[in-house]
Image (cartoon, rainbow, N blue to C red):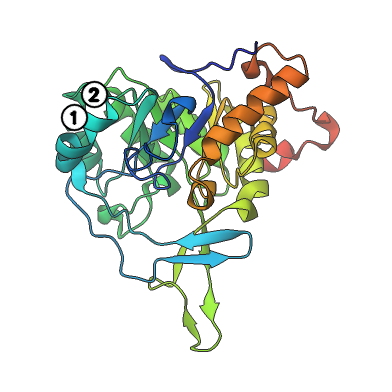
């Protein structure tokens, strides 16, 4: 029997498959159609201090091998989450990781402080790909100093595992992974979506109301793998891989490349049971290959030092 447990900080997951924020609702919506107990954990939709209605439609567009979204962090706010969602989520037999989004350092702190008063939350994922209102809308995640400051502030407020979700829209993601580690993060997750665009040739208008949006799905997997490899070579804390994971084979690529766990995102829109099937596939792969511990696959990639692309990151 294969041991599929993985450890992220003080959190022990039954398997390394998580469902990504924004792709599985808050976690309670799918409990009647997915056996969530077979997942390593659920990451909730991003929560802000107050309710957000998000961007106007159109805000989701299908593309070749992926999708564009510009949801605008629409959510019910931390207050309603605590009163309406958390009582249900506490009863689910899987790890609960709450994703936090904010437009100021103070808002991140306020949201986490409110959540810290509640029971049933196992860890936090901090979405730093949010617009910093004081910087004219520049994402927190594109400034190393901001990632370091946010992580330090939140580390002081909780003993629960902190996962910092990094943007790929920077030159060297390793610098931001190091900043999160220096600030006290227990893990980093990457990648968030790439900036993308689609155009309607009949109207000559962007297909998203906001012109550009976040590209996800199989189209970004090669980029995600490269970023996960880069980050895993730069830090000692666990790396959680995200980006175009549709099958167990995809997940295995991320684990071998250096990820300790993975998040399944776009695949959930096609099949809400995708994460469970991937977890089953990982176990089957290990059993058929005589691997007793799934975690032993992490970082086993064989890279020629002579031709390592790490040279381009130094």
Dividing the picture into quadrants, the one containing residue 308 is top right
Residue 61 position, x and y percent, is: 48, 67
**First of labels 1, 2 by sequence position:** 1
Determine which residue is flagged by label 2: 157
Q: Nearer the viewer, residue 266 or 132?
A: 266
Q: CA distance from mark 1 to mark 2?
A: 7 Å
Q: Is residue 196 visible?
A: yes
Q: Is residue 18 above or below residue 272?
A: above
* Mark 2 surroundings: few (<14), some (14-19) or many (≥20) residues within 10 A: few
Residue at the spot 36% in from the left edge and 59% down from the top edge: 71
Residue at the spot 27% in from the left edge and 46% down from the top edge: 102
Residue 306 position, x and y percent, is: 85, 33
Determine which residue is flagged by label 1: 113
Q: Are marks 1 and 2 in contact (CB under 8 Å)?
A: yes
Q: Nearer the viewer, residue 242 or 270?
A: 270
Q: Is residue 199 above or below residue 51?
A: below
Residue 253 position, x and y percent, is: 69, 35
Q: Quadrant of the C terminus?
A: top right
Q: Closer to us: mark 1 or mark 2? A: 1
**Side (left or right) of 40 relative to 1:** left
* Disc number for residue 93: none
């Amino acid at each position: 029997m294969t041991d599929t447990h993985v450890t992220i900080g003080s959190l022990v997951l039954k398997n390394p498959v998580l469902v990504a924020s924004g792709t599985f609702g808050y976690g309670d919506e799918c409990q009647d159609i997915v056996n969530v107990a077979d997942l390593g954990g659920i990451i909730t939709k991003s929560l802000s201090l107050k309710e957000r209605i998000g961007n106007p439609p159109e805000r989701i567009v299908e593309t070749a091998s992926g999708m564009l979204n510009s949801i605008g962090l629409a959510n019910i706010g931390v207050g309603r989450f605590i009163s309406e969602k958390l009582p249900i989520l506490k009863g689910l037999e899987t790890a609960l990781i709450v994703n936090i989004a904010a437009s100021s350092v103070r808002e991140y702190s306020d949201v986490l402080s409110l959540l810290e008063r509640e029971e049933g939350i196992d860890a936090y994922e901090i979405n730093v790909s949010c617009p910093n209102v004081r910087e004219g809308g520049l994402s927190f995640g594109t400034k190393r100093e901001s990632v370091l400051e946010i992580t330090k502030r939140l580390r002081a407020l909780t003993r629960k595992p902190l996962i910092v979700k990094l943007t790929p829209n920077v030159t060297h993601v390793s610098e931001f992974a190091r900043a999160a580690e220096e600030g006290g993060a227990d893990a980093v997750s990457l990648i968030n979506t790439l900036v993308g665009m689609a155009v309607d040739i009949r109207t000559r208008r962007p297909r998203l109301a906001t012109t550009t949006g976040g590209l996800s799905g199989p189209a970004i997997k090669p980029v995600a793998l490269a970023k996960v490899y880069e980050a895993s070579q730069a830090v000692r804390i666990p790396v959680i891989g995200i980006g175009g994971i549709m099958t167990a084979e995809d997940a295995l690529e991320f684990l071998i490349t250096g990820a300790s766990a993975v998040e399944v995102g776009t695949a959930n829109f096609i099949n809400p049971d995708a994460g469970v099937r991937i977890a089953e596939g990982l176990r089957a792969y290990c059993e058929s290959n005589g691997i007793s511990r799934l975690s032993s696959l992490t970082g086993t990639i064989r890279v020629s030092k002579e031709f390592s692309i790490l040279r381009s990151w130094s």
